[in-house]
Amino acid sequence: MDQNIIAGIGNIYASEILYKAKINPLRRGDSLNNENIKSIIEATNLILNKSISVGGTSIKNHVQPDGKLGYFVQKLKVYGKTKQNCKECDNLISCETINNRSTYFCSNCQK
Ligand SMILES: [Zn+2]
């Protein structure tokens, strides 16, 4: 499998998980308190379970034979949504490159 596709999936999950956990991706890891970390763990479980339930039993099923990402992508809330309105607050979604990863987030919802 193409490593770019795997990295792409990693970016998607990272953006979606932090959005769900309402944590701003620009925050430093050491600024997170226990409650923040708990939110991230809960959001991770939720997003991964959801992606499996809509997309099949493995992450592989999210990539279609033509290399495009599958059904899970249609359920995304922030990833790839630059300049679109946040579903929670109508603020525009931002995109920042962090460690060479495109990270999408709502600066209003995610603190
Ligand atoms: Zn928002």
Image: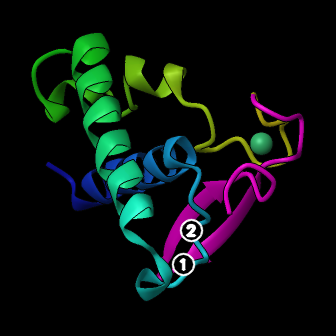
Tag of residue 25: 2
Q: Nearer the viewer, residue 69 or 39?
A: 39
* Quarter of the image where ligand 1 sits: top right
Name the quadrant of the C terminus.
bottom right
Q: Secondary structure at mark 1?
A: strand
Left or right of 24? Residue 56 is left
Residue 38 visible: yes
Residue at (41%, 59%) from the top-left corner?
35
Residue 41 included in the magenta stretch of the image: no
| Residue stretch in magenta | 88-111
Left or right of 58? Residue 6 is right
Residue at (43%, 46%) from the top-left corner?
17
Left or right of 57? Residue 83 is right
Q: Are marks 2 and 1 in contact (CB under 8 Å)?
A: yes
Q: Check disc 1 and report the residue beneath it.
A: 98
Within 10 angstroms of label 2, few (less than 14), some, or many (20 or more) residues? many
Separation (CA) of disc 2 from disc 1: 8 Å
Q: Nearer the viewer, mark 2 or mark 1?
A: 2
Q: Amino acid at mark 2?
A: Pro
Residue 54, quarter of picture: top left
